[in-house]
Amino acid sequence: MGWRICPYLKIGYDVEVKMAIVYRTLLSAGMLMLFTTNLYAAGDKYYVQSKQAKLYEQHSFSSKVVSTLKQGDEVMVLNKGDDWAQVKAGKNSGWLPLLLISEQKPVSRKSVLIEKSDVIEQNARRRASSTSVAGAARGLQGDDSEQSETLKSDYKALEKIEKNVPSEKAVKKFMKEGLEKGE
Amino acid sequence: MMTLLLLFSTQQLPASERLGARARFSEVSKTTADVEEDVKAEIKLGRQIAAIILGKYPLDEREPLNQYVSKVGHSLSYFVGRRELEYYLSVVDTDDINAYATPGGYIFVTTGLLKQLHDESELAAVLAHEIVHVNKRHIIKALNVQGFSDSGQRGIVTFLGGAAGSARVAFDQAVDSAMDVLFSQGLHHENEFEADRLAVQILYQVGYDPDALDRVLTRLSKLGHKHLDVISKTHPSFKQRLAHLSDDEIEQLAKQLDFKRLKPRFEEHTVDLTR
């Protein structure tokens, strides 16, 4: 009984015991609160990345669809495991694939556009900075002759593929023709 | 007591999630501006790698073929794409049987691989696998492990100032390292198994036959083809991949529901490829 909570206050021992009980109760309650909030991670906020995301009753594609969420919708993640997440979305709760949601608020494509001149010098020929890369390139050429250590870049082709992006309308039409009507 | 509390707060996640959770905790504390800078850096890196791949394997000149592959890929990214990225899908002309994804969303499939596919669901399976690599930032993470950043993903932002000096050197080294991963070392096997597993999920989501990836891997495993050199070096064996994929639930569901293979449309668009 050598301990004192308030060694500097001149209060009776029975008061100290009561204070200790109160202190311990508060601490346990606090721990319990922290524990339970951590169990649910205060419902981690996630955002739907996908254009559409079906919410399932169970973590299985064969279970009933509860609702369909759309891109940008906020969900509270309650539980995670095996590539699926249990979430609360508005009034509904259910499961959806983790692949379809992200912790980061969606960032728009426009805000990450970079200047092409940032990246590319038109005639750049880059030196391989490690022999393993040059070696890999040599191996792929399929012949044993001496190869230059420079790696060529084709920026014209790069610009071409960056122009080859179908419109959302064209993609929807393509999906409709194929996945809805095709075999 | 406080240690116990901290232990409790991390044990809510299953073990498989904890590594990802560590990365995500650092991401949660980022501002939107931070994320934008990271994505810009990722795209910058990916573009340079894409340009080098195009220097190694020429872009296939057939526009209808490229547009077809691009539309199949966008049918997938419509559902599972990262919203901040544009996905670029194209065909490169080489007998090597493989597909490649760079950071930032540049995806390539070789004519060598296309010739081995039988229908559109199989093409979708291949592209879905690559989309998962992009979505999960597997190459960026591989580069981080190799020490190109000081802490997690934040470090990649140093590449943005890459005009000269040490930042430029770091950028060039990252590009070389990424090429090494793509053509020589490969990603961590767990990343490949994850890409396979989630590719099947994507096929489900979109409506393609989820058995398609299994068919592709089975067919390639029987080839014994010299043009499988790169894919064999950089990926787990086909046997291992098929073992990780086997799932009775998928096989049962594939029989019950109306999933598409779209063989006629695939054959229509690939008729030019000499087999």
Image: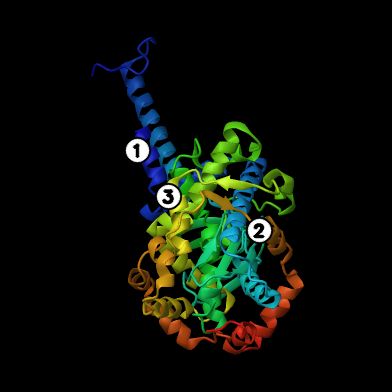
For the residues labelled 1 and 2, the Cα–Cα distance comes to 39 Å
> Are the residues flagged by discs 1 and 2 in contact, CB closer than 8 Å?
no
Q: Which mark lies nearer to you, 3 or 1? A: 3
The residue at which mark 3 appears reads as A132
Judged from this view, the residue extending furthest toward the left is A1
Q: Chain of mark 1?
A: B
Residue A108: % across, % down: 71, 53
**Up-down: is B110 above or below A80?**
below
Q: Quadrant of the N terminus of chain B?
A: top left
User: Considering the numbered disc 3 on the image, is that residue within a helix, a strand or a loop?
Assistant: helix
Amino acid type at image mark 3? Ser
To which quarter of the image does residue B121 belong? bottom right
Residue under the point 76% across and 73% down: A169
| Residue B183 place in picture, x, y as percent | 46, 58
Instruction: Name the residue at 61% across, 48% down.
Output: A125
Amino acid type at circle 2 is Arg
User: Mark 2 and mark 3: span between their CA atoms?
Assistant: 35 Å
Q: Callout 3: residue from which chain?
A: A
| Real-space Cα separation, disc 3 to disc 1, in angstroms | 47 Å
Q: Is residue B222 left or right of residue A154?
A: left
Q: For mark 3, does the 10 Å Cα neighbourhood hold few (<14), some (14 to 19), or many (20 or more) residues?
A: some
Q: Earlier in the sequence, mark 1 or mark 2?
A: 1
Can residue B171 be seen here? The reply is: yes
> Which of these two is toward me, B223 or A55?
B223
Q: Secondary structure at mark 1?
A: helix
- Neighbourhood count class around disc 2 (C-alpha, 10 Å): few under 14, some 14–19, many 20 upward: many
Q: Is the same chain shared between marks 3 and 1?
A: no
- What residue sits right under mark 1 in the picture? B4
Image disc number at residue B83: 2
Q: Is residue B187 visible?
A: no
Q: Residues within 10 Å of mark 1 (few under 14, many from 20)?
A: few
- Say which amino acid is labelled 1: Leu
